[in-house]
């Protein structure tokens, strides 16, 4: 199944109990709210599909894995309701990944920024290439990685999260692997895809009930995300409307 419009593409392919779920957008695979909503709905649907055991989450092309929030939509928000709704889109995706009954393997083929780092962190098992550097640059535009923080901290720890947030600089794929965000890092996408195919097929042969139960164990202690992430979305929504953020966003656009 493919959904495509001016807000990006979402392609779902199912074969041998394995789903390839691919999102894409011309602006470095960034996320407008519409694409976030479509991804959330598809994850929720796949969670209830008895013909699916494993999901491989990937993005289109050979450039960035995900540039995070749509820059154009960040600039366009004009009130707290709109801004909170936008950031809640990322909260919805993270919660859908968290509660999805299927194991999610992340194919992180390139750089990830902001919300893209959060999505990589919310995968149950992420594989990457040497090109898959990560960055949290939100402070530079007057906001912060509030919504994705619980997902990233869960994987790399509070100290590493603080380092990424405050330094707002690129961290290498090797660094991300050392901190636990990536399970393995490969030199080429060919090697990456070979490993993903083998690993997904391996998981697909396991008892789906066992996979669903172990996923619940992986995510124990995150039940408060049903409220926490939306509280964080409101914080981001308020900050993105500040004079500081408006000036910074317009400067970046120029």
Image: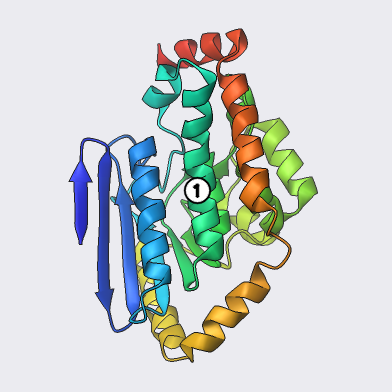
Label 1: how many Cα within 10 Å (few below 14, some 14–19, many 20+) = many
Q: Is residue 131 left or right of residue 194?
A: right
Assign a secondary structure to mark 1.
Answer: helix
User: In percent of the image, x 78 and y 48: which residue is there?
Assistant: 158
* Residue 233 coordinates in the image, percent (x, y): 59, 35
Q: Is residue 183 or residue 213 the one in the foreground? A: 213
User: Disc 1 designates what residue?
Assistant: 92
**Quarter of the rendering occupied by the C terminus:** top left
Does 56 sit above or below residue 231? below
Q: Is residue 55 left or right of residue 133?
A: left
* Residue 11 coordinates in the image, percent (x, y): 25, 58
Does 44 sit above or below residue 196? above
Does 104 sit above or below residue 214? above
* Residue 253 coordinates in the image, percent (x, y): 41, 15
**Quarter of the rendering occupied by the N terminus:** bottom left
Q: Is residue 17 or residue 248 the one in the foreground? A: 17
Does 85 sit above or below residue 115? above
- Residue 57 seen anywhere in this rendered image of the structure: no
User: In percent of the image, x 55 and y 67: which residue is there?
Assistant: 124
């Amino acid at each position: 199944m493919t959904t495509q419009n001016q807000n990006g593409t979402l392609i779902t392919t199912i074969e041998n109990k394995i789903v390839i779920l691919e999102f894409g957008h011309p602006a470095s695979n960034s996320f407008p709210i519409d694409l976030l909503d479509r991804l959330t709905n598809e994850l929720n649907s796949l969670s209830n599909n008895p013909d699916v055991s494993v999901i491989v989450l990937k993005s289109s092309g050979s450039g960035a894995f995900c540039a995070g929030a749509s820059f154009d939509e960040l600039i366009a928000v004009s009130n707290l309701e709109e801004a909170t709704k936008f950031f809640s889109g990322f909260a919805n995706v993270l919660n859908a990944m968290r509660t999805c009954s299927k194991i999610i393997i992340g194919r992180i083929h390139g750089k990830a920024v902001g919300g893209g780092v959060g999505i990589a962190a919310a995968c149950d098992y992420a594989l990457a290439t040497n090109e898959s550097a990560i960055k949290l640059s939100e402070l530079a535009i007057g906001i912060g990685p509030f919504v994705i923080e619980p997902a990233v901290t869960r994987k790399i720890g509070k100290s590493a999260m603080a380092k990424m947030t405050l330094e707002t600089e690129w961290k290498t794929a090797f660094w991300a692997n050392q901190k636990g965000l990536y399970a393995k890092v490969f030199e080429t996408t060919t090697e990456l895809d070979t490993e993903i195919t083998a690993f997904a097929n391996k998981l697909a042969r396991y008892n789906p009930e066992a996979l669903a139960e172990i996923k619940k164990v992986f995510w124990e202690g995150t039940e408060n995300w049903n409220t926490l992430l939306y509280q964080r979305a409101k914080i981001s929504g308020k900050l993105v409307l500040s004079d500081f953020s408006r000036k910074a966003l317009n400067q970046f656009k120029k």
